[in-house]
Image: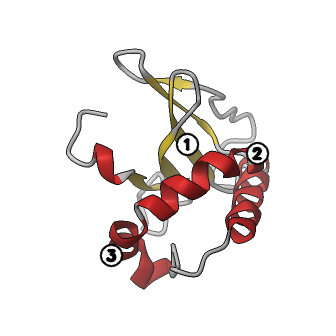
């Protein structure tokens, strides 16, 4: 049984208040922006996600990140889970991600986790 209705359509773009940023499903083609964002904030991200997910490892390569994004892209297309990347308006910078996964707890609609690059920690974005 799927965790979403059969007719569910995920949003292709989610504008954020202020108009300077938006969310959209991540794609393999986003690797050139994702990899430096992740690795530039890797130490802090490891303290959040590392113990549970082993991510992002200090040895993560560009190719490993690319493969990870391809997996996310396929999961999004299949509505198995969703990874939305946070971009500036022109999509010249990837600034974080929001993950929406099937619920693990009874009564929950889903599990949400997120991260932003170090420079945005504590900001209104």
Quarter in which the C terminus is drawn = top left
Within the image, what quadrant is residue 29 found in?
top right
Within the image, what quadrant is residue 20 found in?
top left
State which tag comes first along the sequence, 1 or 3: 3
For numbered disc 3, what is the local secondary structure?
A: helix
Q: Dot 1 surroundings within 10 Å: few (below 14), some, or many (20 or more)?
A: many
Residue 75, given in percent of the width and then of the height, sits at: 73, 56
Instruction: Determine the residue located farthest toward the top in the rendered image.
Output: 19
Report which residue position mark 3 lands on.
47
Dots 2, 3 in contact, CB < 8 A: no
Residue 107, given in percent of the width and then of the height, sits at: 41, 59
Report which residue position mark 1 lands on.
85
Task: Describe residue 65's horizontal placement relative to residue 67 as left or right.
Answer: left
State which tag comes first along the sequence, 2 or 3: 2
Q: CA distance from mark 2 to mark 3?
A: 27 Å
For numbered disc 2, what is the local secondary structure?
A: helix
Report which residue position mark 2 lands on.
29
Coloured how? secondary structure
Task: Describe residue 113's horizontal placement relative to residue 39 as left or right.
Answer: left
Q: CA distance from mark 1 to mark 2?
A: 12 Å
Residue 22, given in percent of the width and then of the height, sits at: 49, 27
For numbered disc 1, what is the local secondary structure?
A: strand
| Viewer-nearest of discs 1 and 2 | 2
Q: Dot 3 surroundings within 10 Å: few (below 14), some, or many (20 or more)?
A: few
User: Which residue is at a point 40% across and 54% down the rendered structure image?
Assistant: 115
User: Which residue is at a point 44% across and 60% down the rendered structure image?
Assistant: 40
């Amino acid at each position: 049984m799927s965790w979403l209705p059969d007719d569910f359509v995920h949003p292709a773009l989610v504008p954020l208040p202020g108009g300077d940023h938006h969310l959209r499903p991540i794609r393999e083609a986003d690797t050139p922006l994702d990899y430096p964002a992740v690795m530039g904030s890797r130490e802090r991200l490891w303290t959040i996600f590392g113990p549970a997910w082993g991510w992002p490892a200090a040895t993560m390569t560009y190719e490993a990140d690319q493969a990870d994004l391809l997996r996310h892209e396929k999961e999004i297309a299949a509505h198995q889970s969703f990874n939305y990347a946070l971009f500036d308006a022109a999509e010249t910078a990837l600034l974080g991600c929001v993950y929406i996964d099937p619920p693990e707890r009874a009564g929950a609609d889903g599990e949400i986790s997120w991260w932003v690059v170090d420079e945005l920690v504590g900001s209104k974005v």
